[in-house]
Image: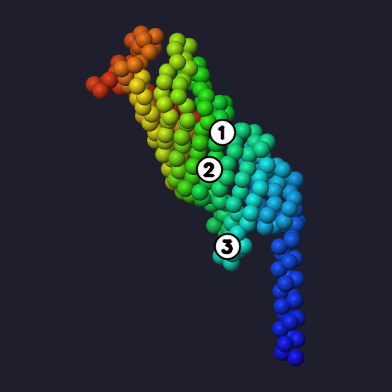
Amino acid sequence: MKKTVLLIIAVVLVFLTSAIVSLPAQLVVAQAPLPNQLKINGVRGTLWQGQASSVVWQGTQVGNVSWTIQPLKLLTGHVEANVRFGRGSDWQMKGRGTVSYGMSGITLSNFIASMPVEQVVKMAPPLPVPLGLSGPLELSIKQLKYAQPYCESGRGALVWNTNTIGTPLADLTVGPVVADIVCSDNRLEVRGSSDSAQVSSEFSATLSSAKQYDAKAWFKPQAEFPEALAQQLKWLPSADAKGQYHFSYKGRL
């Protein structure tokens, strides 16, 4: 009798496990309490491994998204998934990383995304002079806890893999631009620099939850600074004692 009961329990457990593993992702998404900012369409596959043809976050098309859920994390009250995304993105953004969703909200970790810098320029305030910008912009997030509209906390880095900036007078070799990003209580802060034989520079910027930005930067011509650009320096505010030309901007996105 005891063996029979154990056999029945084993069969039931196998059945339940099989049912959960093969549970259609579309059914789960339809019943899940998703944030209002998140819209998911074209879902196929299972709960544990599937994809969506279209994911929209805060009105922006993220594109195709595929995922693999880590079952053991469910025991901690979190849904954690390794995701890939990008095909069909409005921003031509592609990336991968880990997304966790639970009672405390959404958290990103070990997240990497890239997009053309041209797409960033379209969303940024107008530049004071026309510049030719190209190259991929790569964002890496060690960890970020989401809170509307940006984040409660987070840390990461931004790398612009470019070599030159085109100007109406001459191309300027700047080399890769590297910046650190910190978020605290929906206040984003970016600090970065670049260095080449033509010019060195540093910059910083903050963005508040009210979409107000405050940016500061300086550049210093080096030995190989283009002559065509050097002739235009007289129109700028005088350099400081270190030979650095300073700029600052404030406004609202």
Q: Is 97 positioned to the left or the right of 226 in the image?
A: right
Label 3, residues with CA under 10 Å away: few <14, some 14-19, many ≥20: few
How far apart are labels 1 and 2 at the CA level?
A: 11 Å
Q: Is 104 positioned to the left or the right of 185 in the image?
A: right
How far apart are labels 3 and 2 at the CA level?
A: 22 Å
Q: Position of residue 30 (x, y in %)?
A: 74, 54
Rendered position, 209 above or below 15: above
Secondary structure at numbered mark 2: strand
Three-letter code for the amino acid on which mark 2 is drawn: Ile
How far apart are labels 1 and 3 at the CA level?
A: 31 Å
Rendered position, 192 above or below 34: above
- Residue 73 is tagged as 3
At horizontal 50% and vertical 16% (from top left) the residue drawn is: 130
Secondary structure at numbered mark 3: helix
At horizontal 75% and vertical 76% (from top left) the residue drawn is: 11
Residue 237 picture quarter: top left
Secondary structure at numbered mark 1: strand
Residue 84 picture quarter: top right
At horizontal 51% and vertical 50% (from top left) the residue drawn is: 109
Q: In the current view of this chain or complex, which residue is farthest to the left?
A: 241
Label 1, residues with CA under 10 Å away: few <14, some 14-19, many ≥20: many
Sequence order check, earlier mark of 3 and 2: 3
Q: Position of residue 42 (x, y in %)?
A: 75, 45
Three-letter code for the amino acid on which mark 1 is drawn: Met
Q: Position of residue 8 (x, y in %)?
A: 75, 81
Q: Is 192 positioned to the left or the right of 114 in the image?
A: left
State the residue in front, 142 or 203: 142
At horizontal 35% and vertical 21% (from top left) the residue drawn is: 197
Label 2, residues with CA under 10 Å away: few <14, some 14-19, many ≥20: many
- Residue 112 is tagged as 2
Sequence order check, earlier mark of 1 and 3: 3
Circle 1 residue = 115
